[in-house]
Image (tube, rainbow, N blue to C red):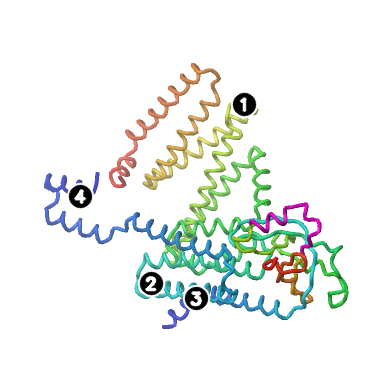
Amino acid sequence: MSLSAKLQVWVENQLITPAQSKEILAFEMKNNKSFFWKAAFSIAALFIGLGICLIVASNWDLLPEWLKLAVDFAIFAALIYGVYWSFEHSKDRLKELFLLLCFLMIGASIGLIGQIFNLDGGWSSFAFAWCLLGIPYVFFSRAVWFNIVWLWILCSSAHFELLDMVFEWISHQFLGLFAAALFFNTLAYGAYKADKFINRYTVIALAAGKLSMFFAYISVIGGGFEWGMFSRGVPPYITLAANIFVFTYFGCRMLLAVKGQNLISFKRNALLVELYIFALFASAFGDLFATGIGFILGGVLILFMIYVLRKTSAYIKKMEIFNE
Amino acid sequence: MNNKIYLLFLFVAPLLCLMAWTGSLYMQRSKGVDIKVAVTGYDPRDLLSGHYISYTIDWDKTDCAQFPDGVCRADEFCKERTFWGINRQCRFYVPEQYARSLDTLFRNRNNEDMVFEVIYSYSKGHKAIAKQLLINGKDWHDF
């Protein structure tokens, strides 16, 4: 139900006066930081930034190299002024736009310099230099996704082949992916704790937390698929241990979500565990009839779990009232 | 007031770094001596920096007398230091509109009579910088 519809119901039921309803609406309109506008600004910045990168990449031969560099640096300087101006005038959306553009401009500039001087550097050097020089812009940005992208690029600079090797090795050990999941969860926990202290300055810790959680989920689900599925041909006790781990993990996550009244996290984990159960049944049953029975049983089990949770948890009810 | 200056300096610092880097590369390129090396191999790609030709230097066909001490310094060419070691891949960037025709020229194995060379700016102790791509002794633009 939308806010205006809710307000109308409250007025009709004499919970609030029409004047209060108007005041609430006015307040919400003033303070509502719509996702649409944020997304529109980010997409526009991305388009412009990528456009600059592509123009640089086309390596136009008509202009002498000094002019290309001069134009590049002049655009960069103008963008820096844009960042500074938006800071001075407290224009938050413009600030985010200019910060993102500055970051992309660094990538484009490194590319241009590499092109002019025929530098041999590969992605690792490029990504590392880009991230290093981009620190001031990322640090001041409040856009979590931008910080996540920065962290992702930084991680990728470590070395793709080495990361591949590590992942290969981990995924072939029974406890590898689950140990990785615990590691990423610890990392996320630390990052979220750090975020409480530094959030007013930067959202980098929050971004690190979200990225770590993403990898934790990948590790748990990856571990479940590698060792927990019945069709993989691993010894039954390993399958059992893997599934106990996966369900305990998701159970703990859901419990924490309920305790923290975090409905989004609760729903995410519930959906993932449902999908995992689906995959488990699909791997367990051979013929269509048995699979059908399995799915029905799985569906009934999930419905039962939801019913019990909704009936017993006052927290869930509270979350649904205040978060939906 | 001080905070504003710090903030501005923070934002300008990356630009200053890029300018300093460009300046140092420019100085290095203009101070070095020209060394002409024979090249083989091809692998034009399209990355953020645009199209480039990837090649290896054929030291057997390169005149080492061009070097100040008369010894070929292969170590100072196409060397990219990474965290995990040294990566050796030479690149020469070409504009997008010529990439396809140059690619065809490089790929055509029937062009046995063609000689591909790159002129480098070389200063001892520094990584050599590629300046010009030559095909049969002529700049690739004129070919």
Provide the secondary structure element on which disc 2 rests.
helix
Provide the secondary structure element on which disc 1 rests.
helix
Tell me, for residue A74, which label it has, or none. Answer: 3
Marks 4 & 3, CB-CB < 8 Å contact: no
Marks 2 & 1, CB-CB < 8 Å contact: no
Magenta highlight on residue B21: no
Residue toward you, A56 or B124: A56
Give the amino acid type for the residue marked by disc 3 in the picture.
Ala
User: Label 2: how many residues lie within 10 Å, few (<14), some (14-19) or many (20+)?
Assistant: some
Q: Nearer the viewer, mark 2 or mark 1?
A: 2
Give the amino acid type for the residue marked by disc 2 in the picture.
Ser
The residue tagged 2 is A86
Magenta highlight on residue B104: yes
In which quadrant is the C terminus of chain A drawn? top left
Tell me, for residue A4, which label it has, or none. Answer: 4
Q: x, y percentage for residue A64?
A: 59, 74
Tell me, for residue A302, which label it has, or none. Answer: none
Give the amino acid type for the residue marked by disc 4 in the picture.
Ser
